[in-house]
Amino acid sequence: MKVALLREATARLLPAIDSKGIVKEFTYFYFNGDCVEATNGSLLIRSFLSEKSPVFAVEALTFYSLLKSLPDEDVEIIVNEKTVELKTKTVKSELTLPGTPAKSTIDFNIEAWGEVPGDLIHALGMCRYTACPDQTAGSLTGVRIEGDVVLSCDRWRISIFNLAKATGMSGATLPVDLIDELTRFAKTINGWAIKGNTIYFRMEKAIMGAQLLGGDFPTVKLLDAIAMTESSMELKLSKDIKAKIADASARQNIIQEKIMEYDRQSKFTFENNKVILFALNEAVGKIEEEIACPDSPKAAFTFYVNPVFLLKMFEETDQLTYSAEHSVASFLGPQFVHMVKTKAPAAA
């Protein structure tokens, strides 16, 4: 087997490795003939190999680091009683086998795969930005699929994506670590299935899955909240203003580039016929920018939005509205709606 192909196959498993090592079984690669598998207790991944391998388990991060250091030659894997050898033309290495069953017990046996709706992965990626970051928030930390809609929310934001085709799913909440991987491999996904409490996605070179999040999800309340947009006033953003806001958001991303993508935020203030964008990164600096906005409402208001998300929303939506009655700003498009609570500037 080529080192490069083995390295590629095991790299797909790294998101399912528990780097903290609290549960030892979650720190291993499980080689199983034509595939290698891993799980961290939530995310589970099977990666297919180009050639058959012996059946064994090995500490994942050390094994992968070693693979990265090897020259791109053919590699032979030899499993002994207590060790596994990796032999190339020029390098012979030996790693101790863990005292654990060599064969994975992760369930990847799916009898039938369904067709993935064409816009589902994109919808999950959009709504992922609004999933609640508070890990004590239960099902709100994930993204919900319910029939022909995908939804997410936290205590001050709501995102709803209307799919072009119904999923046939009565309700499933996906964890965000799975969604992050699905968006990375979106173009290769060609099937999905649910078995018990686990959802699976089939790709060209892997199968990826995760346990669904339990707990009630406020689907009806979120869909009812859209009624707030009916009494809203539209903020008429010309193409020129939207382009300037997009440019400003790109600069705010530069200030925050060392911050995890989903943790970034910019403050938007509409007042006195202008919009003010502000971002702070305490480790780097801050940036503020004013853009003329003649149609901003008389009552000033402020809201926060992730600048990466904003750039994506501009591609999905064609209206920005504001409801003083409900203190809500809404980005509205043919399929996607994002609503965010607003505050008076002095209180923001």
Image (cartoon, rainbow, N blue to C red):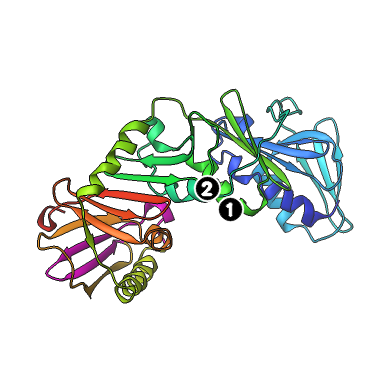
Using the image, tell me which numbered label, if any, was put on residue 180: 2
Contact, mark 1 vs mark 2 (Cβ under 8 Å): yes
Which quadrant of the structure image shows residue 55? top right
Q: Which residue is mark 1?
A: 184
- The three-letter amino acid code for the residue at tag 2 is Asp
Q: Secondary structure at mark 1?
A: helix
| Marks 1/2: CA–CA distance | 7 Å
Type of the residue with mark 1: Arg
Q: Is residue 185 left or right of residue 120?
A: right
The relative height of residue 305 versus residue 41 in the rendered view (above or below) is below
Residue 89, how many percent across, how many down? 89, 57
The spot of residue 273 in percent (x, y) is: 15, 71
Q: Residue at x 41, y 31 (%)?
A: 139
Report helix, strand or loop for mark 2. helix
Whole-percent x and y of residue 38? 66, 36
Could you say where residue 176 lies in the image, as x and y percent from the top left?
A: 48, 42
Q: Which residues are magenta?
A: 258-282
Q: Is residue 153 magenta?
A: no
Any mark on residue 125, and which?
none
